[in-house]
Image (spheres, rainbow, N blue to C red):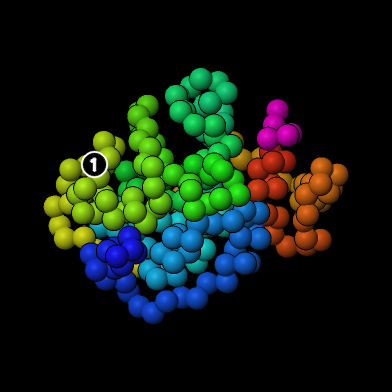
């Protein structure tokens, strides 16, 4: 029995498989994605487990829960700042952390994207919203969710009340409320990014969205 089968028996998916165009998604991100995540996202769509664990999705109803939106890059930038300045302990190289979900309490779920070319071997990390603790899980995102929702895995950052009710999945609904953007966001000159990327061997489209991986590489290279 696969982890996804166990999860679907535990939490009934909301409808039919979505059939997401993963080639386009991976091109936008500039990196491959784990097979288990693609199956999970196809089967469940955007939403959250137990009204607490939200998974970023290519069809996220706002840019703040979209896997291809700006949040993973912004979160990584904050982690890099903490890492470089020693503000908070970050036990992994921030360049290997890619946010793939968040909790209602403010924790983030990350893929540890090492090795970069073998996403099916990526592990899961969870930070603490207002503290120094980190938790690392040596397995896939689907296995992590299954372990947490069955009570077989205990994440110190998650509240004990998480399992007070039976496991469930709630699809996301569009909302008109948007959280404010980070105050440290800087203006983006997309032409400059494309020029820099081509000069450094990256392939970028002449127009449209710049892959997240390219944007993050440019931010690291030009960070003041």
Q: Whole-percent x and y of residue 34?
A: 50, 56
- Residue 179 lies left or right of residue 25; in this view the side is left
Residue at the extreme front: 1
Q: Whole-percent x and y of residue 56?
A: 45, 56
* Magenta residue span: 220-224
- Residue 55 lies left or right of residue 189; in this view the side is left
Determine which residue is flagged by label 1: 154
- Residue at screen point 69% across, 31% down: 223
Placement of 147 over or under 40, stated as above or below? above
- How many numbered marks, from 0 up? 1
Q: Quadrant of the N terminus?
A: bottom left
Q: Is the magenta stretch mostly helix, strand or loop?
A: helix
Residue in the foreground of this view, choosing between 206 and 31: 31
How many neighbours does mark 1 have within 10 angstroms: few (below 14), some (14-19), or many (20 or more)? some
* Camera sees residue 106: yes
Q: Whole-percent x and y of residue 122?
A: 48, 47
Q: Whole-percent x and y of residue 68?
A: 57, 57
- Residue 29 lies left or right of residue 126; in this view the side is right
């Amino acid at each position: 029995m696969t982890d996804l089968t166990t999860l679907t028996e535990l939490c009934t998916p909301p409808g039919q498989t979505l059939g997401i165009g993963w080639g386009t998604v991976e091109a936008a991100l500039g990196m491959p994605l784990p097979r288990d995540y693609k199956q999970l996202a196809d089967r469940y769509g955007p939403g959250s487990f137990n009204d607490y664990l939200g998974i970023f999705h290519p069809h996220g109803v706002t840019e703040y829960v979209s896997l291809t939106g700006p949040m993973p890059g912004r979160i990584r930038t904050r982690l890099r700042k903490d890492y470089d300045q020693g503000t908070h302990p970050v036990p992994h190289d921030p360049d290997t952390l890619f946010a793939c979900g968040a909790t209602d309490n403010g924790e983030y779920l990350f893929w540890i994207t090492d090795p970069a070319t073998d996403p099916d071997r990526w592990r899961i990390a969870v930070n603490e919203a207002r503290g120094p603790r980190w938790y690392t899980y040596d397995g896939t995102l689907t296995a992590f969710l299954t372990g947490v929702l069955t009570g077989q895995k205990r994440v110190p950052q998650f509240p004990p009340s998480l399992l007070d009710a039976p496991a469930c999945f709630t699809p996301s609904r569009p909302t008109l409320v948007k959280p404010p953007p980070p105050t440290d966001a800087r203006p983006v000159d997309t032409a400059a990014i494309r020029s820099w990327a081509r000069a450094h061997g990256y392939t970028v489209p002449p127009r449209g969205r710049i892959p997240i991986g390219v944007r993050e590489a440019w931010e690291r290279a030009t960070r003041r």
